[in-house]
Image: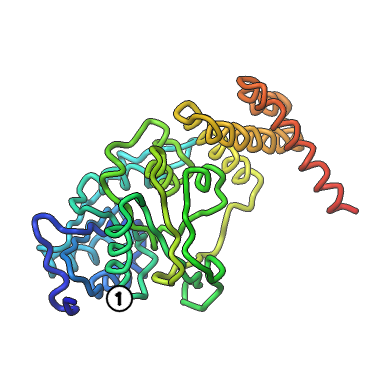
Amino acid sequence: MKNRNTCVTASLRPKVSVLILTYNHVQFIRKCIESVLAQITTFDYEIVIGEDGSSDGTFEVCSTFRNRYPRVIKLANHSRKNVIKICGRVTGRANLINTWSLCRGEYVALLDGDDFWIDDFKLQKQVDFLEKNKDFNLCATNVEFRTRDLGFIRLKYPKGKTRVLTLFNFIDERTILATASAVIRRASISNFPSWYYSSFSGDWGLFTITCLNGGKGALLPFITAVYRVHGGGLNTSADSCWRLKLFQKSYWEIIPVLNGRARMLAIRKYSGYSARLALRHLVSGRHTDAVTALRGCFHWPMGIIYSVLEVLRVIIKRSRDVS
């Protein structure tokens, strides 16, 4: 194994590109980068930082690290003028796409600027897994959820054995992987399809692409990273409606590229979000918006059935909650 001082000597063809996305993370980005530099590996890796036009000094901190490790760290300063909006709101999607294009490694490890790694052998373990299992395009691990001040909250997943993931896991949203733990085989994503630009999560979109052509993912049972849980959240009625629209649009865009069971599952998910959005509008007295929300379901006979079933499910649940 290489030691801490020699592991960060990136070659022209690094084995791994560590893709860090950051925006206004000045309080956290130093620990994030240091946790990557601490990795102990038998291969070279590079760090590619996508800085999304921060206004709090994050770029300056990243520049300091880049100047200290010029052979290892690339720093891209993305302009806020080129952001991609989804359902009317600014996202970091353009920063992700641009930063991905700068990665040269056979594998890409993902990390957000406010999270960090806690296993110095993280990259080695996950690359070893993907090297031995060529039919897997993705692997991720368990992570710790912690507060901003690093107070422990819980593990993301119960402790267990390695889980095999397929396209259905991601379409059904039953397994939402932690970004900070994911390592992707770069060749499994040759381009970003049109539906990706409006998917509800950039990471979910990446994971889904890797499995579209029969590829598999793995959730490994060990812990490698910390995910910081920040305060706030989407609690207002307006934010709730926006989130439902976001998921509705995501499934509408991806349905045409799916077949068989995956397509039917996506139609069910789309219809469910449409029904919940329509109910939100009805409660707020926006009847025209409610009709508009349901209109897409009529493209498929099962879409109508799924939307009706979802309405009934929500009504029954609310009546039980009241009683």
**What residue do we see at 70% from left, 25% from top?**
304
Q: Position of residue 87 (x, y in %)?
A: 50, 35
Nearer the observer, 275 or 127? 127
Residue 285's place in the image compared with 23, above or below, is above
Q: On the image, which quarter does residue 311 sit in? A: top right
Q: Is residue 162 left or right of residue 34?
A: right
Which residue is pictured at 65% across the width and 27% down the height? 303
Residue 47 appears left or right of 269: left
Task: Give the residue type that dot 1 points to.
Answer: Asp
Dot 1 corresponds to which residue? 120
Would you place residue 262 above or below residue 42 in this image? above
Specify whether 225 is left or right of 190: right
Q: In screen coordinates, is 295 left or right of 117?
A: right
Asked if residue 269 can be seen in this view, the reply is yes
The answer, for residue 64, to whether it is visible in the render is no
Residue found 50% across the figure and 67% down from its top = 161
- Secondary structure under tag 1 reads loop
Q: Quadrant of residue 301?
A: top right
- Rendered location of residue 81, percent (x, y): 30, 40
Q: Residue 162 placed where, x, y %?
A: 47, 64
**Residue at x-position 46% and y-position 67%:** 142
